[in-house]
Structure formats: C-alpha cells, structure tokens
Amino acid sequence: MPKTPHYHYLTLEQRAALEKLLRSRIGAKADLDAALERLHQPDYGVCIECGNDIAFVRLQADPDALHCADCARLLVKL
C-alpha cells in the first residue's frame, strides 16, 4: 500500500538546483515545460510505486525519475 506523499519534501534550494539542471539538459520547449511542470508539483520526488521519497542524489542524476532506487531495481528485474 502506497504511503501518503511527503509534500514539499525537497527544499527550495534543491528544487532550484534541479530546475537549473533540467533547463541545461532539455532543449525542446515542450519537453522543458513538461519537466518543469512535474518539478513544481507537490509530490515531485515521491516514488509512484511505493510512495517513499526519491533520493535527491537520484533526482540529480535523473530529474525525470519516477521511482525510488529500490522500486527501480525491482522493475529492472521484471
């Protein structure tokens, strides 16, 4: 059963750093707009599978990550 999302889990500084990273990596305006929209949602950084927080270092490596490291490993095994 998924946990309740940790709203505002990321600090403003972390969100700003991720926004800067997204802007540097994404060239197409539509893709950038979609990524920034996700970033500014209150449940950004929460695993869609288990509801646990996605580690900030994982989000830095992949700002589009939708799963925590544990769930991502389980999905790869399937």
Image: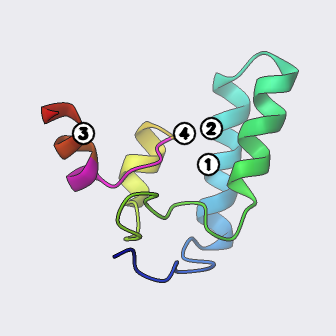
Residue displayed at 54% across by 42% down: 63
Using the numbered discs, state the Cα–Cα distance from disc 2 to disc 4 in whole angstroms. Answer: 11 Å
Region in magenta: 65-71
Q: Amino acid at mark 1?
A: Leu
List x then y, in percent, for residue 60: 47, 45
Residue displayed at 18% across by 42% down: 73
Q: Would you call the spot at circle 2 few (<14 residues within 10 Å), some (14-19), or many (20 or more)?
A: some
Using the numbered discs, state the Cα–Cα distance from disc 3 to disc 4 in whole angstroms. Answer: 16 Å
The residue under label 4 is 64
The residue under label 3 is 75
Q: How is the image coloured?
A: rainbow
Considering the numbered disc 3 on the image, is that residue within a helix, a strand or a loop?
Answer: helix
Q: Amino acid at mark 3?
A: Leu
List x then y, in percent, for residue 31: 76, 25
Q: Which mark is residue 65?
A: none
Using the numbered discs, state the Cα–Cα distance from disc 4 to disc 1 in whole angstroms. Answer: 10 Å
Using the numbered discs, state the Cα–Cα distance from disc 3 to disc 2 in whole angstroms. Answer: 26 Å
In screen coordinates, is 21 left or right of 37? left
